Amino acid sequence: MIKLTNFFVSLSFAGYIKIIPPGTFATFLSIVILFPIVEYKIISFEILVFFFIVIFLLSLFFINKFSAHTQSYDSKIIVIDEFLGVYLILIFYDQIKIINLYVTLILIFILFRFFDILKIFPANIVDKKLKSAFGVILDDLIAGIYTIIILYIVNAYF
């Protein structure tokens, strides 16, 4: 069970990459995995949202298992939270895409990493106070929401 847990929370072992920060690599990998699904509408919007919920719930379970096994909280190896943050952003892709897909993807990457690292309120509170699997995920979802808001505003002017 621990191998499956490790595989899941590290996004197929991407969390073990040490050349660049694991969260940065996971963000890039998440965009590479999810963008074609969203851009080419491989699955319907409803199924996209359904899978988000399923992955979210599985993440809560596996992050708890991983944290208990490693006696750690929010390990750098856990990058499924970055995947969920990017996933949330791409659920709103049709409303936030601007100019062309390359500019949009670069902005998604940069803004999400910016907000994920900076942890602007309330993400900073979540990061400090919620020492649970939900807290690990929630600060990335907040970073995703901030990214969506910024891109939505930018989209209104282009």
Image (cartoon, rainbow, N blue to C red):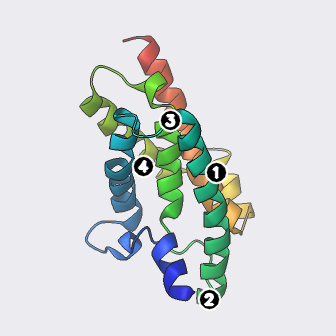
User: Where is residue 25 shown, x and y percent of the image?
Assistant: 33, 61
Task: Please identify, in this view, whether the residue under mark 3 or under mark 4 is nearer the observer.
Answer: 3
| Residue hosting label 1 | 53
Q: Amino acid at mark 2?
A: His
Front residue of 86/132: it is: 86
Q: Is residue 156 left or right of residue 120?
A: left
Q: Amino acid at mark 1?
A: Ile
Marks 1,3: beta carbons within 8 A? no
Front residue of 3/99: it is: 3
Q: Give the spatial CA distance, label 4 vs label 1.
A: 22 Å
Q: Does 45 appear above or below 66?
A: above
Q: Is residue 109 visible?
A: no
- Residue 113 shows which numbered tag? 4
Marks 3,4: beta carbons within 8 A? no
- Residue 44 shows which numbered tag? 3
On the rendered image, what quadrant is the C terminus found in? top left
